[in-house]
Amino acid sequence: FALLINPQANGAYFKDTLLVASAEFQAVFGEQTLEHRVIGNLQFLVASLDESLLTQVLRLSFVLGVFEIDGDQFIPIDVASKYNLHEDFVFGSKYRGKTNEHLTQLLLNVGLSYLPKGTEQPTLLDPMCGRGTTMLWAMRYGLSAKGIEQDVKAIEDLRQGLKKWTKLHRQRHKMMEGFIGKANKKGLGKFLEFTVEEQNFRIINGDSREAATLIKSEKFDLIISDLPYGVQHFTTDKTRNPISVLAECIADWKKLLKKDGVIVLAFNSYIPKRTDLIECFENNGLIAQSFTAPHRMSESIVRDIIVFKHA
């Protein structure tokens, strides 16, 4: 089969799209040699696959369509990806600093690939969730999710986006707000919970270093986050390197991770270095896995992905 590479994937992975696509494919479907073909302006990855896997193939972050190869002909396959909710649930809202939707889907696919086979209804936590792209993807996958974000404006921005989406699609839903603990003027502990078609997520305003306090009596199969890249963002200790903040977060993240759970993080490999990130997590009893997918975003950012599991 030939997998048509979505041109939008280039906006996520830039000139390294083929390398990232190959890494994602092999994480999900196992090692095999992939062939790159170009026809006109269209790019394909050619792979050997059982036809029963094609629905899953369409959930790869770089795939736009699937074609069966018959001699020199590429025949489009009529198969759907079977997501929940409309595509614009994830892709509709646009704002400065939004995590690329294709990258977020890649992180989710990689995380799911590391879970034990047969894991039913995985749950997800994004402890630095921004405006919730990871949680929105989780709902399209049929997963329940929670997120923590320190920016007090995040909840209002997300609420407005959800209101527009539900109005546009005349979608029945439930939206609930409240506080974890006592209400306060700073908004710390404030949450927004959104439910639609039996999927739901909750975003909580708070400090990721206090994740286990904000989310009590719950453990997650997946902890997934796109870390600040150290270019536009300063950490709470006024540096661009998030490693010191992460070191303070790990204990609580580990408490919230199930025994067979997986942590997947996207980060700028210039700051922190991959070796420093591994050392930080392994000092806290979490072991780095082999997955990597580095790709240059700009002169100052080479984004990579790292996976951790319990020792």
Image (cartoon, rainbow, N blue to C red):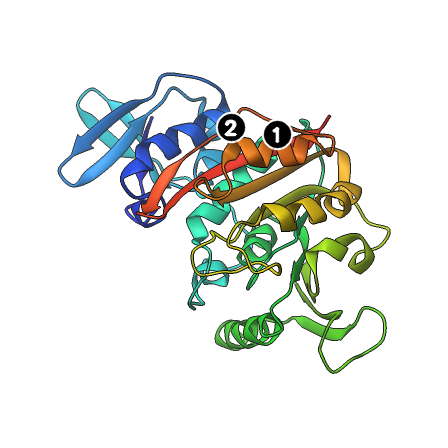
- What residue is rendered at 70% in x and 65% in y? 206
Callout 2, which amino acid?
Phe
Q: Position of residue 18 (x, y in %)?
A: 31, 32
Label 2: which secondary element: loop
The residue closer to the viewer here, 108 or 263, is 263
The vertical placement of 109 against 230, above or below, is above
The vertical placement of 161 against 40, above or below, is below
| Res 111 quadrant in image | top right
Q: Specify the farthest residue to the bottom.
A: 185
Q: Are marks 1 and 2 in contact (CB under 8 Å)?
A: yes
**Crowding at label 2, few (<14), some or many (≥20) Cα neighbours within 10 Å?**
some
Real-space Cα separation, disc 1 to disc 2, in angstroms: 10 Å
The vertical placement of 45 against 174, above or below, is above
The residue that label 2 is drawn on is 291
- What residue is rendered at 49% in x and 59% in y? 90
**Crowding at label 1, few (<14), some or many (≥20) Cα neighbours within 10 Å?**
many
Drawn side of residue 308 relative to residue 49, left or right: right
- What residue is rendered at 27% in x and 32% in y? 44
Q: Which mark is residue 5?
A: none
The residue that label 1 is drawn on is 114
The numbered mark, 1 or 2, whose residue comes first in the sequence reads 1
| Res 207 quadrant in image | bottom right
Q: Position of residue 132 (x, y in %)?
A: 57, 60
Image quarter (top left, top right, bottom left or bottom right) of the C terminus: top right
Q: Which tag is nearer the camera, tag 1 or tag 2?
A: 2
Number of marks in picture: 2
The residue closer to the viewer here, 33 or 195, is 33
Image quarter (top left, top right, bottom left or bottom right) of the N terminus: top left
| Res 57 quadrant in image | top left
Q: Position of residue 231 (x, y in %)?
A: 43, 56
Callout 1, which amino acid?
Tyr
